[in-house]
């Protein structure tokens, strides 16, 4: 019998030296909302337009429910990044749009609170997520995209071993405008882990 990666539904916790990745829970709301609020001008150029209730508890509950549904369906895993030293939320990373069948692939997206940017935490997060995606989820390929002017994101992906594969014109609607994106990929056979 084929063992499916999401069949057991145990809650993944990925622990590293400096950060831990875990699924968000209700009690994370205050830290998450405060960090996103403090980082708003830092994050908005790289994200879809924020909804009116973006930082409200109702918006948080919607996110938690969507994460739960996607995890249960095997189509996504949304993690919070926790700074181990401070036991504080410092960002998030999502394995999303998981496709099975002949593709066996996913897309990743991530964000980092401004106070934590530039410290290497996102590379640490990718060092945890990549083996999880390839070993536990048994995916063959991980895809990512970023706006060409987002030099920090470009560096993060390249440090994590992703290969630039091209440019998608008018790929995603970010901050209210259709934006070109650099496309990156990592195949399990090429992963440095």
Image: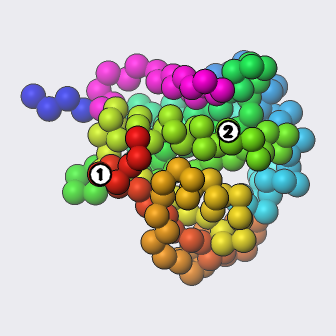
Q: Residue at x 48, y 76 (%)?
A: 166
- In the displayed structure image, the side of residue 58 where residue 25 appears, left or right: left
Say which residue label 2 marks. Answer: 121
Quarter containing the C terminus: top left
Q: Callout 1 environment at 10 Å: few (<14), some (14 to 19), or many (20+)?
A: few
Can residue 91 be seen?
Answer: yes
Check disc 1 and report its element: helix, strand or loop.
helix
Q: Residue at x 51, y 39 (%)?
A: 127
Q: Looking at the magenta stretch, what is its main secondary structure?
A: loop
Residue in the foreground of this view, choosing between 10 and 164: 164
Res 102 → quadrant: bottom left
Decide whether residue 15 is among the magenta residues: yes
Q: How is the image coloured?
A: rainbow
The residue furthest bottom is 169
Quarter containing the N terminus: top left
At which x and y percent is residue 2? Answer: 14, 32
Residue in the foreground of this view, choosing between 98 and 150: 150
Task: Examine the rendered structure and indicate whether residue 122 appears above or below residue 79.
Answer: below
At which x and y percent is residue 62? Answer: 65, 36
Q: Residue at x 32, y 35 (%)?
A: 135
Res 34 → quadrant: top right
Labels 1 and 2: the sequence-earlier one: 2
Say which residue label 1 marks. Answer: 189
Residue range highlighted in magenta? 5-23
Res 72 → quadrant: top left
Marker disc for residue 118: none
Task: Examine the rendered structure and indicate whether residue 46 appears above or below residue 86.
Answer: below
Task: Examine the rendered structure and indicate whether residue 22 appears above or below residue 95.
Answer: above
């Amino acid at each position: 019998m084929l063992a499916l990666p999401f069949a057991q539904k145990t809650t993944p916790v990925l622990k590293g030296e400096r950060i831990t990745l875990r699924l968000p829970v209700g009690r994370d709301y205050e830290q998450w909302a405060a960090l996103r609020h403090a980082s708003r001008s830092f994050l908005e150029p790289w994200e879809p337009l924020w909804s009116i209730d973006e930082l409200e508890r109702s918006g948080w509950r919607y996110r938690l429910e969507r994460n739960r549904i996607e995890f249960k369906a095997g189509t996504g895993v949304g993690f919070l990044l926790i700074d181990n030293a401070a036991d504080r939320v410092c960002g998030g990373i999502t394995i999303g749009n998981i496709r099975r069948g002949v593709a066996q692939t996913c897309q990743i997206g991530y964000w980092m609170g401004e106070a934590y940017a530039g410290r290497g935490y996102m590379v640490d997060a990718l060092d945890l997520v990549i083996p999880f995606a390839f070993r536990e989820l048994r995916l063959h390929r991980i895809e990512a995209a970023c706006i060409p002017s987002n030099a920090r994101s470009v560096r993060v992906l390249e440090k994590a071993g992703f290969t630039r594969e091209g440019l998608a014109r008018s790929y995603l609607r970010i901050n209210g405008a259709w934006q070109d994106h650099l496309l990156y990929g990592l195949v399990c056979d090429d992963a440095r882990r």
